[in-house]
Image (spheres, rainbow, N blue to C red):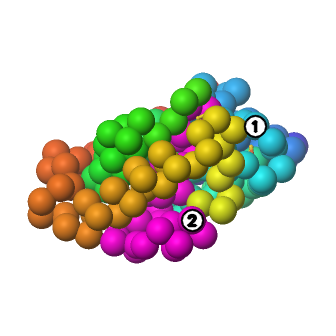
Amino acid sequence: MAAPIAFRLNGVDRRTEVPPDTRLIDFLRDRLELTAAKKACGIGRCGACAVLIDGRAVNACLVMAWQMDGADIVTPEGLETLPHAKTVRQALAEENAFQCGYCASGFVVVLTAYLRDHPGAQEQDIRAALEGNICRCTGYRSILRGAMAAARMLAEPDRDVPSDGSQSDASQTVEAS
Ligand code: FES
Ligand code: FES
């Protein structure tokens, strides 16, 4: 039987019902057509499906949609509202961090959560934070360069953090289709 859930998604309050066997990644991609979070391994090994749940990076293939009742979810589509996410994206882009890009959203989500709490993090800490993210293309050096550049930028927010990224107005409530 479908379960009613209410949650916040990318700054908008939503209500819907979900079957008990639907994973969050499938709910986001197949039902809500939010496809920036990717489904690759489907078993928690690659990080491609990462989203922010209550500010923490979580693999969306490992949680059920019904567990999102009361949660505040930010998918890669919603990261533009977070100033530190904009910095992470900018730094990765300047290093041409990705090739095919399939892994990119997962790296950005994980780095956004980690560097928010650890601005100025060093390489070994960033490597540890990214242990759950797999990239098949790059060899990781360009991603690490971008991540370290983001850490430096976030450690000096007055100089480098974009100034136009404000939280979105979350007053609207919509029904998920
Ligand atoms: S698809 Fe979720 S961790 Fe790989
Ligand atoms: S850039 Fe292709 S998987 Fe990472």
SS at circle 2:
helix
SS at circle 1:
loop
- C-alpha separation, residue under disc 1 versus residue under disc 2: 21 Å
Tag 2: amino acid: Arg
How many residues crowd mark 1 within 10 Å: few (<14), some (14–19), many (20+)?
some
Q: Residue at x 46, y 40 (%)?
A: 97
Q: Could you say which quadrant of the image residue 38 lies in?
A: top right
Tag 1: amino acid: Ala
Q: Residue at x 60, y 69 (%)?
A: 128
| Percent x, y of residue 20 | 84, 47
| Percent x, y of residue 39 | 72, 36
Please tell me whether residue 61 is drawn above or below residue 157 in the rendered image.
above
N-terminal label among 1 and 2 = 1
Between 116 and 54, the one nearer to me in the picture: 116
- Residue 76: tell me if it is visible: no
Q: Which residue is mark 1?
A: 40
Q: Residue at x 47, y 68 (%)?
A: 123
Q: Is mark 2 within 8 Å of ligand 2?
A: no
- Residue 88: tell me if it is visible: yes
Is residue 5 rendered to the left or right of residue 53? right
Q: Is mark 1 within 8 Å of ligand 1?
A: yes
Quarter of the image with the C terminus is: top right
Between 16 and 40, the one nearer to me in the picture: 40
Q: Could you say which quadrant of the image residue 152 lies in?
A: bottom left
Q: Which residue is mark 2?
A: 127
| Percent x, y of residue 98 | 51, 36
Is residue 11 rendered to the left or right of residue 141? left
Write the start and end of the magenta stretch as one range. Answer: 101-129
Whether residue 112 is in magenta: the answer is: yes
| Percent x, y of residue 34 | 57, 30
Magenta segment, principal secondary structure?
A: helix
Q: Residue at x 69, y 38 (%)?
A: 136
